[in-house]
Image: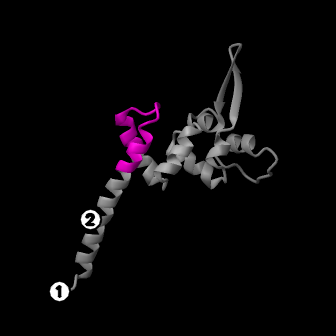
Amino acid sequence: MPLTDEDANALNHIIMHYNREKYVQGMFDAIRSFPIYDDEDAELRAFDWVAEGFTPECACKWISQGCFCAACAANLVIAGVTPYEAGIPYDYRYEEVFYSDTVGYKYANGEITLQEAIDIIHPNVKRSGDLQ
């Protein structure tokens, strides 16, 4: 007996849900090894990374370069930035002490804008408009 369209859609929904749960579990397993995430936070962030379309391997590349926010990493991807470029050191001074983070970290942490991150990574590229 062939499936009706309604039955086929219901079955497709069940399969997609199962695969998504499996995919989120794979993302959770991949990102929880980073010390910035405890298990509870990693579970929540796993959904974010999956929703933004990242694979576990790709998410780990961004996180290892300091970009711990899936939405920020997605913005950087759209702007043509790679995870390795996001790992460019960003040195700054605060109260007579020098610090160094990555551009990806500073952007994900809300300390610089997307446009500032892009300008640091690609200083000689002329762009029209602000990418914030």
Distance, label 1 to label 2, CA atoms, is: 20 Å
Residue 110 vs 10, above or below: the answer is: above
Give the residue number, with chain letter if any, for mark 1.
1
Label 1 amino acid? Met
The boundaries of the magenta stretch are 25-45
Residue pictured at 44% horizontal, 53% vertical? 51
The numbered dot on residue 14 is 2
Q: Quadrant of residue 72?
A: top right
Number of numbered labels in the structure image = 2
Magenta-colored stretch includes residue 49:
no
Residue closest to the eye, 6 or 50: 50
Residue pictured at 57% horizontal, 36% vertical? 66
Residue 104's spot in the image, x, y percent? 61, 39
Quadrant in the picture for the N terminus: bottom left
Q: Is residue 107 left or right of residue 59?
A: right
**Circle 1: is it few (<14), some (14-19), or many (20+) Cα within 10 Å?**
few
Residue closest to the eye, 80 or 84: 84
Residue closest to the eye, 49 or 83: 83
Label 2: element kind? helix
Residue 34's spot in the image, x, y percent? 46, 35
Query: Principal SS element in the magenta part?
Result: helix
Label 2 amino acid? Ile
**Circle 2: is it few (<14), some (14-19), or many (20+) Cα within 10 Å?**
few
Residue pictured at 69% horizontal, 32% vertical? 90
Residue closest to the eye, 130 or 75: 75
Q: Residue pushed farthest bottom?
A: 1
Residue pictured at 41% horizontal, 38% vertical? 32
Q: Quadrant of residue 5?
A: bottom left
Label 1: element kind? loop
